[in-house]
Image (cartoon, grey):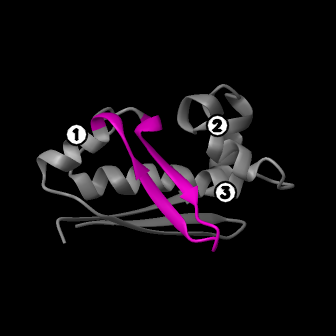
């Protein structure tokens, strides 16, 4: 393993941020991610989990906010429902420089908290 990152996001706080700044959705999340959660009654828990993935990926890479564009990291859902981490752009360049060739991700959320774990190998 070359890196491990964990992040937790308070769903209510994240929901308030989305309400105050609606443009944040398009700034942070890919159109595929937004489509994935669009049909939910409350998309905040799913989006909070996807935001946690970005933070956990930064930690797995050993970098901070601003090291790559937030759209460089996203979650794609496999037909089985399993999340798959997609890493492109500057995030992929950083991974390559660190010899990272595989990613493992786990995400979960309740009504109150969203958590992501990202392992880089």
Residue at 17% x, 65% y is 2
Left or right: 6, with 75 as reference point: left
- The secondary element bearing badge 2 is classed as helix
Which contiguous range is marked in magenta? 70-90
- The secondary element bearing badge 1 is classed as helix
How busy is the neighbourhood of tag 1: few (under 14 within 10 Å), some, or many (20 plus)?
some
Above or below, 85 relative to 4: above
Above or below, 120 relative to 88: below
- Picture disc at residue 46: 3
Cα gap from disc 2 to disc 3, whole angstroms: 14 Å
Residue designated by label 2: 31
Q: Which mark's residue is nearer the viewer, 1 or 3?
A: 1
On the question of residue 64 being in view, the answer is no
Please state which of residues 10 and 93 is positioned toward the viewer in this rendering: 93
Cα gap from disc 1 to disc 3, whole angstroms: 27 Å
Please tell me which of labels 2 and 3 falls first in the chain: 2
Image spot of residue 108 (x, y percent)? 58, 70
Please tell me which of labels 1 and 3 falls first in the chain: 3
Please state which of residues 73 and 62 is positioned toward the viewer in this rendering: 73
């Amino acid at each position: 393993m070359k890196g491990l990152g964990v992040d937790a996001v308070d769903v209510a706080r994240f929901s308030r941020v989305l309400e105050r700044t609606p443009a944040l959705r398009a700034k942070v999340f890919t159109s595929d991610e937004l489509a994935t959660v669009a049909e939910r009654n409350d998309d905040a828990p799913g989006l909070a989990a996807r935001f946690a993935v970005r933070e956990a990926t930064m930690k797995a890479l050993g970098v901070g906010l601003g090291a790559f564009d937030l759209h460089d990291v996203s979650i794609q859902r496999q037909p089985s429902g399993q999340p798959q981490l997609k890493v492109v752009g500057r995030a992929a360049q950083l991974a390559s420089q660190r010899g990272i060739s595989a990613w493992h991700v786990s995400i979960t959320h309740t009504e109150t908290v969203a958590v992501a774990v990202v392992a880089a190998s």
